Amino acid sequence: MERQLGELPKKAKEKLAENKKFFAKLKKRPPKNLDYVMGELHDAEFERTDCLSCANCCKTTGPLFTNADIDRIAKHFRLKPSRFIERYLRIDDENDYVLKEVPCAFLGMDNYCSIYDVRPKACREFPHTNRKKFHQISNLTLKNTSICPAAFNIVEEMKKKIKL
C-alpha cells in the first residue's frame, strides 16, 4: 500500500489533463443514469478497497467541520463546543472549521478512527464518489484522485463505462 500511495500523486497528475477534459464534457451533458452508474462503481470499488490499510485521507488532509459536527463530537468528548474548537480546530481561508494539523488527531496507529461513530460528515462521505449530482463536484473529485486510491480507480472505471 505504501508504494501505491507514493505513486498515486504522480499517476493522478499524469491523468489530470485527460480527466479535466472528461469532466468538462460530463458537466455539459451528464448522462441521465450518472448517479446510478457512480453508485455501482463506488460500491464495486469499496468491495475491493480496505480503507484501514490506507487511511491516506486522514493522514494528509483534514475535513471541514460543520456546526453539527462540532456539536456532536464535542458532546461525545463531554466538552463545550468552544473548548473542542479551541483544542482541535482552526478557521481556514474560506472561513471553515478545519483540523489544526494533519494527520488527524483522531487517527490511531492502526488506522482506526477513535471518533468513527461521530466523525464529521465530510469523513463519512469521503471520497464523495457516490454523491448525488456527481457531475457538480468534479474539482473535488480530481483533487481526491491524488489522495485516495479508490477515487482514482473509480474515475478510471467511470471513463471506461461512460462514453461521452
Image (cartoon, rainbow, N blue to C red):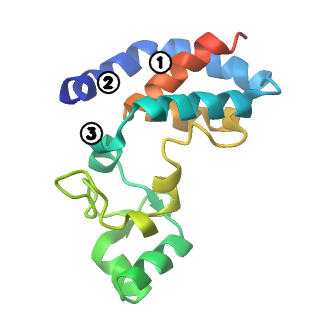
Mark 1 vs mark 3: in front: 3
Is label 2 in a helix, a strand or a loop?
helix
Q: Amino acid at mark 1?
A: Leu
Rendered view: 66 above or below 125: below
Q: CA distance from mark 2 to mark 1?
A: 12 Å
Mark 3 vs mark 2: in front: 3
Residue 98: mark:
none
Q: Amino acid at mark 3?
A: Ser
- Residue at the (42%, 29%) spot, across then down: 48
Q: Amino acid at mark 2?
A: Leu
In the rendered structure, which disc, 3 or 2, sits on the residue that comes first in sequence?
2
Front residue (pair 36, 146): 36
- Residue at the (49%, 55%) spot, across then down: 124
- Residue at the (51%, 17%) spot, across then down: 156
Query: Which residue is tagged 3?
Result: 53
Rendered view: 43 above or below 52: above
Query: Which residue is tagged 2?
Result: 8
Residue most extreme to the front: 47
Q: CA distance from mark 3 to mark 2?
A: 15 Å
Query: Which residue is tagged 1?
Result: 16
Where residue 40 appears, x then y in whole percent?
Answer: 63, 30
Q: Residues within 10 Å of mark 3 (few under 14, many from 20)?
A: few
In the rendered structure, which disc, 1 or 3, sits on the residue that comes first in sequence?
1
Where residue 148 appears, x then y in whole percent?
Answer: 39, 34
Residue most extreme to the right: 32
Residue most extreme to the left: 109
Q: Residues within 10 Å of mark 2 (few under 14, many from 20)?
A: some
